Image: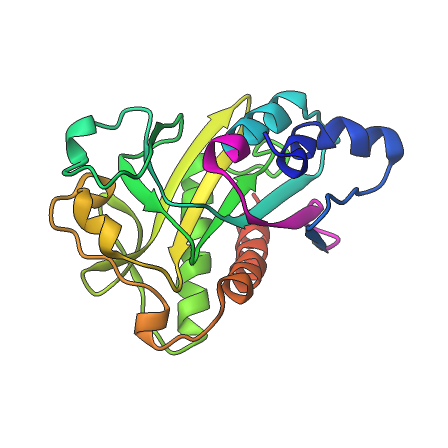
């Protein structure tokens, strides 16, 4: 595990003892919040290994307490296929030499790679009085609002979590909740090589087309898209507090 990702696993305890936010080398930390919304810290991790980041999420979640601030981790991953906890291996159609990781998130199979924005959503759902279904809706709406701000109409599809433009999927979701703490999150295709999606049934749907923001005429860099999506998500989380 890299030093930067390893530090995230123990961040909760460190910040509680020091009473302030820490930074890891190479990160940009941005506090978001209001008098209504519990504090929300956005961390830009850059490009990080999937398995290391997944373990860091598990460790962070296990270490957090009622006073631990909620966090959004924005990152990209080297090429990797990930399979959800109940995912079926037959949805991997061909071997491209890309690693396959069996994860503990919900959902089936998806692909992560450079140029795709991933935001991991580390929230205390009880403190926010937020149900899982409302969290899913908030994440989807944040993506929809981001695309709408650039003139692109996006939508949900019944029975298929995520965000779509027409028939094509542009963002995928997968979450895990332990002791009312969420982790994993959302991936948004921004400016990436899409061909590995042809080697899978994306999210378990044979022949599902995928798209990305660049091909929709939105010319944000992955870093710009990550920060914009994090801001939209912060707004949606506040709106859905009960």
- Residue 186 vertical placement versus 219 (above, below): above
The residue lying toward the viewer, choosing from 156 and 129, is 156
Residue, x 56% and y 43% (percent of image)?
Answer: 242
> Left of 71 or right of it: where is 96?
left
Q: Quadrant of the N terminus?
A: top right
Q: x, y percentage for residue 108?
A: 26, 34
In magenta segment, residue 42: yes
Q: x, y percentage for residue 118?
A: 47, 49
Q: x, y percentage for residue 117?
A: 46, 54
* Colour approach in the figure: rainbow
- Residue 26 vertical placement versus 203 (above, below): below
The residue lying toward the viewer, choosing from 84 and 142, is 84
Q: x, y percentage for residue 191?
A: 39, 64
The residue lying toward the viewer, choosing from 47 and 185, is 47
Residue, x 31% and y 59% (percent of image)?
Answer: 193
> Left of 134 or right of it: where is 37?
right
- Residue 87 vertical placement versus 134 (above, below): above
Residue, x 46% and y 37% (percent of image)?
Answer: 50
In magenta segment, residue 21: no
Residue, x 21% and y 65% (percent of image)?
Answer: 166
Give residue 2's quadrant in the image: top right
**Residue range corresponding to the magenta coloring:** 34-53
């Amino acid at each position: 595990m890299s030093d930067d990702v390893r530090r995230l696993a123990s961040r909760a305890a460190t910040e509680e003892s020091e009473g302030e936010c820490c930074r890891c080398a190479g990160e940009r930390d941005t506090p978001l919040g209001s008098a209504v919304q519990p504090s929300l810290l956005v961390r830009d991790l850059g490009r990080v290994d999937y398995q290391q980041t997944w373990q860091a999420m598990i460790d962070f979640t296990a270490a957090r307490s009622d006073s631990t601030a909620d966090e959004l981790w924005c990152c990209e991953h080297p090429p990797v296929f990930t399979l959800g906890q109940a995912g079926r291996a037959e949805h991997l159609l061909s071997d491209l030499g890309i690693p396959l990781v069996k994860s503990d998130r919900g959902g089936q199979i998806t692909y992560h790679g450079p140029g795709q924005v991933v935001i991991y959503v580390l929230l205390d759902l009880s403190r926010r009085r937020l149900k899982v279904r409302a969290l899913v809706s908030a994440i989807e709406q944040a993506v929809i609002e981001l695309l709408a701000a650039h003139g692109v109409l996006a939508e949900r599809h019944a029975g298929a979590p995520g965000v779509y433009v027409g028939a094509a999927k542009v963002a995928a979701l997968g979450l895990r909740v332990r002791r009312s703490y969420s982790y994993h999150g959302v991936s948004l295709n921004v400016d990436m090589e899409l061909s590995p999606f042809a080697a899978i049934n994306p999210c378990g749907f044979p022949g599902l087309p995928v798209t990305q923001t660049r091909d929709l005429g939105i010319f944000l860099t992955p870093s710009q898209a990550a920060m914009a999506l994090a801001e939209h998500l912060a707004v949606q989380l506040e709106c859905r507090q009960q």
